[in-house]
Image (spheres, grey):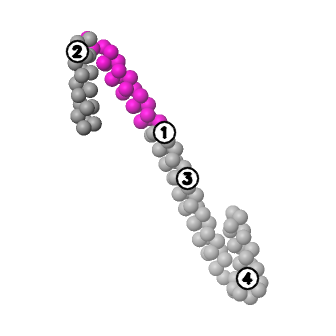
Amino acid sequence: MTVLTDTIRDHFITCVDAGRFDGDGLDALLGHVEAAQFRLAEIEHFREASAANSAEERETRARIDQLAQAVILKGNADLEQPTHDAHVRAMEAREAVHRG
């Protein structure tokens, strides 16, 4: 039992003692409450797992971006100077067109 189900049980018993309820249905009520709490716990677990996966995914994407940038820089550094200069001019021209 959880604190919530204990509280409901105590309140239900108090209401039965006061004559507001006949006492039937307490077990069914507590069963519904516990089932709802179980579903909520599953949802919370899913949210936590999802958040962890999202953080891991962001870290992986950042690492891939870093590695891709390193490969591009290495590839540019390996070009012979005239080829490298032409490549840089082409990239600058594309960037200028992109900027407008």
Which comes before the other along the chain, label 2 or label 3?
Answer: 3
In which quadrant of the rendered view does residue 61 lie? Answer: top left
Hey, what amino acid is under mark 2?
A: Thr
Query: Is disc 4 placed on a helix, strand or loop?
Result: helix
Q: Is residue 85 magenta?
A: no
In the rendering, at what x and y percent does residue 62 appear? 43, 34
| Mark sitting earlier along the chain (3/4) | 4
CA–CA distance in space, label 2 to label 4: 88 Å
Nearest-to-viewer mark from 2 and 4: 2
CA–CA distance in space, label 3 to label 4: 35 Å
Circle 4 packing at 10 Å, graded few (<14), some (14-19), many (20+), is some
Provide the residue designation for mark 2.
83
Quadrant, the C terminus:
top left
| Relative depth, front residue between 48 and 14 | 48
User: In the visual, does 52 lie left or right of 82?
Assistant: right
**Disc 4: which residue:** 15
Three-letter amino acid code at disc 4? Cys
Which disc number belongs to residue 56?
A: 1
**Dot placed on the residue nearer the N-terminal end, 1 or 2:** 1
Disc 2 to disc 3, C-alpha distance: 55 Å
Residue 42 rendering spot, x and y as whole percentages:
54, 57
Disc 3 and disc 4 in contact, CB within 8 angstroms? no
- Name the N-terminal-most of marks 3 and 1: 3
Label ID, residue 45: 3
Magenta-tinted stretch: 59-80
Residue flagged by tag 1: what amino acid is it?
Glu
Which residue appears at 23% of the width and 28% of the height? 93
Element type at mark 1: helix
